[in-house]
Amino acid sequence: MSNESPDLLLNDAELSALLQGSKSVAVIGVSAKEDRASNHVAKYLIEKTDLEVYLVNPALDELWGKKVYHSLADLVAEVGKTIDIVDAFRKSEDIPEVMDGAIAAGAKVLWMQLGIRNSDEAERGRSYGLEVIQNRCIKIEFQRLGI
């Protein structure tokens, strides 16, 4: 796995347009543990953005009164619509499986959270037309851009 691919190919205006133009996000690997970043980020997205937030974790059924889907495929099958952003809180070596799901789901963006980078998969995702963001926190970017 190479690490030569840039983490973000968008400038701030493009990133802002992408975030503001997105309608939905699936948080892959959300945790019920309050000390986990995935918990804080998912809660922020639910409370502070206009995104329709879907939660995905095979070990959970419900969180904050919201259904938690066991997989991205289950989510897409049930809601019957495309998810704009797939926000991954998974280890770098798990990203190929997440990317497969994002491609199959017709997602527009695969977002790998802070500390998560898989440049080979980023390249593969871009070849399928996905915008791929690595090693960035979607919550931080919303806050930094003031949206």
Image: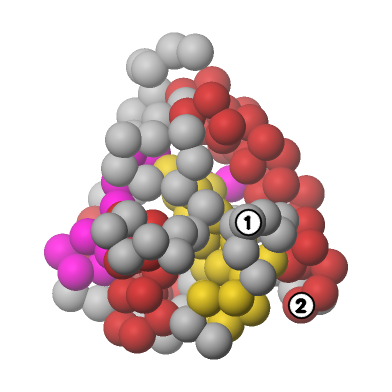
Q: Point out which mark residue 59 bears.
A: 1
Label 1 residue SS: loop
Residue 82: where, in percent of width, then height? 71, 68
Location of residue 137 with respect to 76 vertically, above or below: above
How many numbered marks does the figure carry? 2
Mark 1 neighbour class, 10 Å CA radius: few under 14, some 14 to 19, many 20 or more: few
Query: Could you tell which of marks 1 and 2 lies nearer the N-terminus?
Result: 1
Observer-nearest of 19 and 52: 52
Is 133 situated left or right of 88 in this image?
left
Q: Specify the amino acid type for callout 1.
A: Ala
Determine whether 30 is above or below 95 in the image: below
The span shown in magenta is 129-144
Query: Does 71 lie within the magenta span?
Result: no
Q: Quadrant of residue 97?
A: top right
Q: Residue 75: x percent and y percent?
A: 73, 67
Q: Is residue 129 rendered to the left or right of residue 77?
A: left
Q: Position of residue 47 (x, y in %)?
A: 35, 85
Looking at the rendered structure, which numbered label has been put on residue 76?
none
Type of amino acid at the residue the image marks with label 2: Val
Disc ID at residue 79: 2
